[in-house]
Image: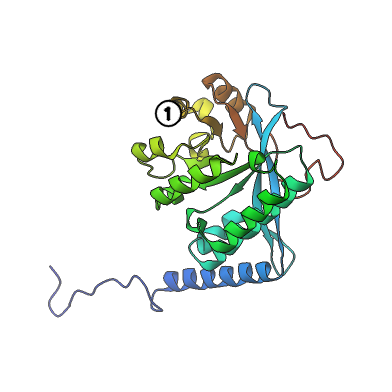
Amino acid sequence: MLPPGRTKKSPTLVGDSNPLASAITQRDRTTLDMVRSALDNRQAMLAFQPVVFSSHPGKVAFYEGLIRIRDGTGRIIPAKEFIPSVEKTEIGRRIDCLALELGLRELEAEPGIRLSINLSALSIGYPPWIKALEAGLARDETIGERLILEITESSAITVPELVMKFMDQLQTRGVAFALDDFGAGYTSFRYLRDFFFDILKIDGHFVRGIHADRDNQILLSALTDIGKHFEMITVAESVEHPEEAEFLRGLGIDCLQGFHFGTPLINPSWRMGGKNQQAG
């Protein structure tokens, strides 16, 4: 009960009177402006991180091309710093287009690699993205079988029927699909059965410290079994220590990705004249 003479006020959650909300709004606006400027000036690039076979860590199964932008000061900004603010906007669609164009160009220039590129389900059917894909596939008949499109679990579940149809069309042309960040979202097992993803990438939350975390050992084992049941190649993300890699290898994970095997590089070995260790 309130003291006499006082009335209950509803908490203010948004608006100028909430300093936190105002700060978040301003931050998002600043991020949008930064990303828009970088795209307008083509100040974007891919950083390439290897995904290795767990049984032969010296052999690369494929590389993931991670989008980066350069801000007004020349700093290179990783995707995690701006994607949450732009993913549902037109800028998010432009980022997906540019990432695809850069990836296709890299596949064309380096026939010895296989490359995955991230894609939001919101970009499926976006005309400029489709145009870029068709142009890339037409330039080199081998690109389709060397291209992997990664769609996050949370993104895929928003428009499952559209994703399924899109995957079916492109898989017949050799393009593979990876379900990214598996375990971090809320994918229905019914949808997982219907999607027919080729690769299952298990979210790093379950991987970090796996050798010493009994709870995550049980959970990751279950996620691995799900992938194997649906005949998907399993990839453990965010592997940072040899103890984690050894445990995952024993668990039967097919591939490993993380700083333990290589940081994302803007100038990968094949551009520098180094030997490409990807398996054929």
Residue 112 to residue 155: above or below: above
Q: Residue at x 39, y 49 (%)?
A: 161
**Residue 85 locus on image (x, y percent):** 51, 63
Protein image colouring: rainbow
Give residue 255's position: percent from left, percent from top. 60, 29
Crowdedness of circle 1 by 10 Å Cα count: few (<14), some, many (20+)? some
Relative depth, front residue between 23 and 268: 268
The reply, left or right, for residue 65 in relation to residue 219 is right
Instruction: Pick the residue in front: 155 or 230.
Output: 230
The residue drawn where x is 48% and y is 35% is 206
Residue 156: % across, % down: 44, 48
| Quadrant of the image containing the N terminus | bottom left
Using the image, determine if residue 93 lies above or below residue 174. below
Which residue matches tag 1?
Answer: 226
Return the residue found at the far top: 250
Is 50 left or right of 234, judged from the image as shown?
Answer: right
246 sits to left or right of 200: right
Q: Residue at x 43, y 40 (%)?
A: 195
Residue located farthest toward the right when viewing the structure as drawn: 273
Q: Nearer the viewer, residue 206 or 174?
A: 174
Q: Quadrant of residue 91?
A: bottom right
- The quadrant the C terminus occupies is top right
Is residue 233 something one can see in this rendering?
Answer: yes
Q: At x 42% / y 30%, what residue is drawn?
A: 219
Residue 127 x, y percent position in the rendering: 55, 62
Secondary structure of the residue carrying tag 1 is helix
Identify the image quadrant of residue 33.
Answer: bottom right
Q: Amino acid at mark 1?
A: Ile
